[in-house]
Image (cartoon, helix red, strand yellow):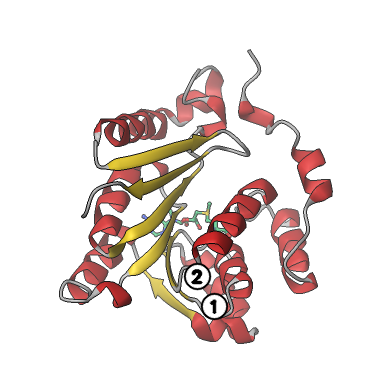
Amino acid sequence: MKYVRDIPFKEFVDSHHKAVDEDLAELRRTNEDADVPLIFTETEEILGLLTGLTHPSRILEIGTAHGYSSLFFAKKLPYAHITTIERNPVMVEAAKAEFASRKEGERIDFRVGDASEILNELVSELSDADETEKFDFVFIDAAKSHYREFFEAAEKICTKDALIACDNILLKGWIVEAEGRDAKRHRTSIKYMKQFLEYLQQRDDLEVSILTGADGLAIIRFINEK
Ligand SMILES: C[S@@+](CC[C@H](N)C(=O)[O-])C[C@H]1O[C@@H](n2cnc3c(N)ncnc32)[C@H](O)[C@@H]1O
């Protein structure tokens, strides 16, 4: 069986990708040239479709890197506010510069630190908040071993109609077949990602869609009242 390792059809999908604007296209090129992690074009398109249909006004993102996906949300949804979390100091400096040099940066609340701690702060900040102050779209794209923890914190601070999208759930196909040296190096992430997906499956109050495009994206919504 052929797995996702080299992202099938990537060139084809990339060749059909339309960037939101030339500034974002250039940011994608510079991120890709410098090997900075960022969402695949296919993931970007799914996120664009979902947010275009649901019109979120408060987006929470876990995992900023150089700020590509935060700026994508901010440009795509000109009325939305984005809170994004990053802990790596090198990434933080780069993202700060990207946000500071664009008007969209004014709608981005950049929280620096470990996502577990920042999420705890956000849970405290929003504990008495009403639905209008909570997040209506969450994008989880950080430490792959911590998705369950991120998800459980995020669900406390999002609206009942929110969507939560989790990137890289296939882990280059290792989630199905973990072979070779690279898979061995990532065995902890693989183990925890499998447990996270099983946990989602066991929850009767969630509708979970597993998409296998790019590196896999899980899209979750709440069926029952939270
Ligand atoms: C895949 S990159 C994010 C890419 C970004 N969403 C984009 O598409 O432009 C993941 C980022 O999450 C950060 N990260 C990983 N674990 C984290 C944690 N526990 N707290 C905060 N940031 C974390 C990493 O430093 C890395 O920059």
Residue 218 x/y as whole percent: 46, 41
As drawn, 50 above or below 118: above
Residue 103 x/y as whole percent: 62, 87
In the rendered image, the quadrant that contains the C terminus is: bottom left
Residue drawn at the location 84% of the way across and 47% of the way down: 15
Residue assigned mark 1: 96
Q: Secondary structure at mark 1?
A: helix
Residue assigned mark 2: 92
| Mark 1 C-beta to ligand 1 under 8 Å | no
Distance between the Cα atoms at labels 2 and 1? 6 Å
> Do the CB atoms of the residues marked 2 and 1 lie less than 8 Å apart?
yes
Among all residues in the image, which is located at the extreme top? 1
Amino acid under label 1? Answer: Lys
| Residue 134 falls in image quadrant | bottom left
Q: Nearer the viewer, residue 143 or 209?
A: 209
Residue drawn at the location 61% of the way across and 65% of the way down: 68
Q: Is residue 56 left or right of residue 145?
A: right
